[in-house]
Image (cartoon, rainbow, N blue to C red):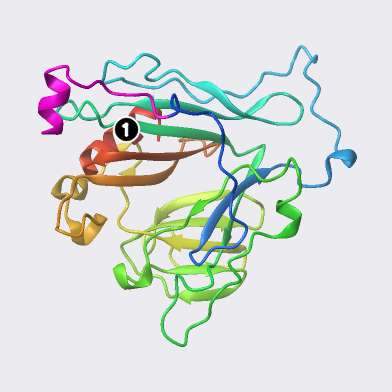
């Protein structure tokens, strides 16, 4: 029915953020684990000297151009400033992609964060992820990161423990042990972010790891969609309660130089469509 309405012109695809630009208030305590990008530096603004913008040798950061566009929406593949550093320069851009020609109403929103100006943190939730009688987290974003002008965004950190027992660790507390063959986001004490496969790219936990979180198989490796993506199995990637594979999906990714962190989200997505959107923006 949706395909008929959109192919016949009864309805048209919409830009995700046209309906309202106001941002909702962010929770400071959650039952699920939370990933929180924050500004760099994180000291009070009164003690920070903004990066000069008049320096002729200073080149403001921008995400790499979108590699390909697949839809017809105005603005597809065009990066626009989304969140500004207090010096005035953007530390996050956003764009949109239509990755599924059979579902033009499937619009993926993408936010690109400058990892030289933003840090990624991970907090274990009060209930998830964990096992019975296992360790839990506080579910709270630290006060130092909730200071005005510091917290950039917050988003859920993955599936519940019952949907795969994906590994999770924060500040030395292992809520769930890691599983070989699954993707993992690793946060290091030098504030770098690594995404790879546990057991291949990341072999074991090391002292310099501040946090890590698993959430299903790897989607893209070295600029190529992994063959497993095209099996589109609920057992690998999740789906609807009745077993459907076209649903709301989200993902994290990195640029080849690890300078840019991408957050990707959209409705009516199969796994191949999600992967095409990720590849298109440079993940």
Q: Which residues are magenta?
A: 1-16
Q: Quadrant of the C terminus?
A: top left
Residue 60 or 97: which is nearer the viewer? 97
Q: Quadrant of the N terminus?
A: top left
Task: Answer left or right for 37 relative to 255.
Answer: right
> How dense is the environment of label 1, judged by Cα within 10 Å: few (below 14), some, or many (20 and up)?
many
Residue 204 placed where, x, y %? 47, 69
Circle 1 — which element?
helix
**Numbered circles on residues, count:** 1
Residue 51 or 158: which is nearer the viewer? 158
Task: Answer left or right for 172 relative to 67.
Answer: right
Residue 242 placed where, x, y %? 14, 58
At x 42%, y 85%, the residue is: 132
* Above or below for 251 versus 143: above
Magenta region, main secondary structure:
loop
Work out whether residue 222 can be spotted: yes
Occupied quadrant, residue 27: bottom right
At x 42%, y 69%, the residue is: 167
Residue 85 or 67: which is nearer the viewer? 85
Residue 120 placed where, x, y %? 59, 50
Q: Give the residue number, with chain letter if any, for mark 1.
A: 277
Residue 157 placed where, x, y %? 46, 57
At x 17%, y 23%, the residue is: 6
Work out whether residue 205 can be spotted: no
Q: Residue furthest right?
A: 47
**Within the magenta stretch, is there residue 59?**
no
**Within the magenta stretch, is there residue 12?**
yes
Task: Answer left or right for 246 relative to 221.
Answer: left
């Amino acid at each position: 029915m949706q395909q008929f309405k959109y192919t016949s012109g009864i309805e048209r695809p919409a830009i995700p953020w046209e309906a309202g630009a106001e941002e909702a208030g962010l929770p400071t305590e959650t039952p699920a684990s939370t990933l929180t990008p924050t500004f760099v530096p994180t000291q009070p603004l009164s003690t920070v000297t903004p990066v000069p913008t008049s320096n002729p040798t200073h080149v403001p950061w921008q995400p790499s151009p979108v590699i390909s566009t697949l839809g017809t929406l105005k603005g597809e593949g065009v990066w626009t400033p989304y969140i500004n550093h207090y010096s005035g320069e953007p530390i996050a851009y956003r764009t949109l992609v239509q990755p599924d020609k059979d579902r033009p109403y499937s619009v993926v929103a993408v936010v690109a964060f400058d990892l030289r100006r933003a840090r990624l943190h991970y907090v274990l939730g009060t209930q998830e992820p964990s096992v019975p009688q296992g360790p839990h987290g506080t579910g709270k974003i630290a006060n130092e990161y909730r200071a005005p002008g510091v917290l950039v965004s917050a988003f859920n950190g993955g599936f519940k423990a019952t949907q795969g027992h994906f590994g999770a660790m924060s500040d030395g507390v292992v809520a769930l042990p890691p599983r070989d063959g699954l993707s993992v986001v690793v946060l290091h004490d030098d504030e770098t972010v690594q995404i790879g496969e546990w057991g291949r790219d990341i072999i074991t936990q090391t002292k310099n790891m501040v946090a890590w979180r698993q959430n299903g198989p790897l989607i893209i490796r070295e600029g190529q969609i992994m063959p497993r993506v095209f099996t589109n199995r609920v057992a690998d990637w999740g789906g609807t309660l009745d077993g459907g594979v076209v649903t709301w999906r989200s993902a994290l990714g990195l640029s080849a130089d690890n300078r840019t962190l991408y957050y990707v989200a959209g409705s009516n997505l199969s796994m191949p469509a999600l992967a095409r959107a990720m590849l298109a923006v440079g993940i």
